[in-house]
Amino acid sequence: MTPEHVRDAAAVAAIFGFFAMAWFGWAQEAPPARWVKWLAAGSAAGILTLIIGGLLVWRHWSDGTVFDDQVSPRFGLVVGIEFASAGIGAALLAWRKRADLISAWIAFVVGVHFVPVAMVLSIPALHIVAAAVTVASAASVLVARAKGLIVSAVVGLSVGGLLLGAAVLSLVDALTR
């Protein structure tokens, strides 16, 4: 991922590890039986990445970060817009009796929000994560329908896998500096 500061690389690993675990968990709503052990393993790997990344953040807390008086409010604004968009869209989908698409909508919002996050935090590699998660959100709906699976299982598996991969890459980056 190569953020400027080790602390930021470790934080990306921890945060992506947490959210990978969460997406793998969401995928367990009603997956095919053969997926369950892999989803559990993905969740466990996400937790492990979260813990190691968190310990590295703590160890490098005083080493510097991109977050300052200018970056922090912009990051907060991006995250606020993400949460509002995800929540409003989820509510509209539920109201329209399309709750089956909420996971795909939230994944889409998450993917799109990585574009401004990449710019605000000066981590160009997040653009790759943005594109992959955004594409996965839409492709998962098509794959789920074609294979007779529920959308949340496919979205959770794909987005969880992408975030876990990015988390591990960021962890390796933090560990090898």
Image (cartoon, grey):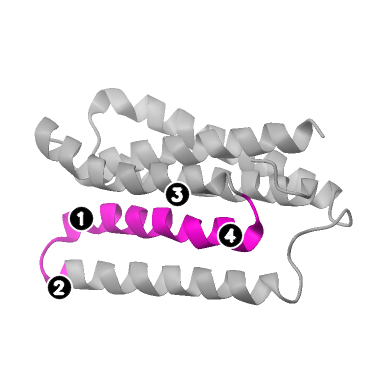
Name the residue that disc number 1 marks.
Answer: 101
Q: Sequence order check: which comes first, mark 1 or mark 3?
A: 1
| SS at mark 3 in the image | helix
* Distance from the alpha carbon under mark 1 to that under mark 3: 19 Å
* Distance from the alpha carbon under mark 2 to that under mark 1: 12 Å
Specify the amino acid type for callout 1: Leu
Image mark for residue 146: none
Q: Position of residue 42 (x, y in %)?
A: 47, 32
| SS at mark 4 in the image | helix
* Distance from the alpha carbon under mark 3 to that under mark 2: 28 Å
Name the residue that disc number 2 marks.
Answer: 95
Mark 1 Cα shell of 10 Å, populated few (<14), some (14-19), many (≥20): many
Name the residue that disc number 4 marks.
Answer: 119
Q: Are marks 1 and 3 in contact (CB under 8 Å)?
A: no
Residue at horizontal 68%, vertical 70%? Answer: 71
Name the residue that disc number 3 marks.
Answer: 130
Residue at horizontal 68%, vertical 36%? Answer: 171
| SS at mark 1 in the image | helix
Q: Sequence order check: which comes first, mark 4 or mark 3?
A: 4
* Distance from the alpha carbon under mark 1 to that under mark 4: 29 Å
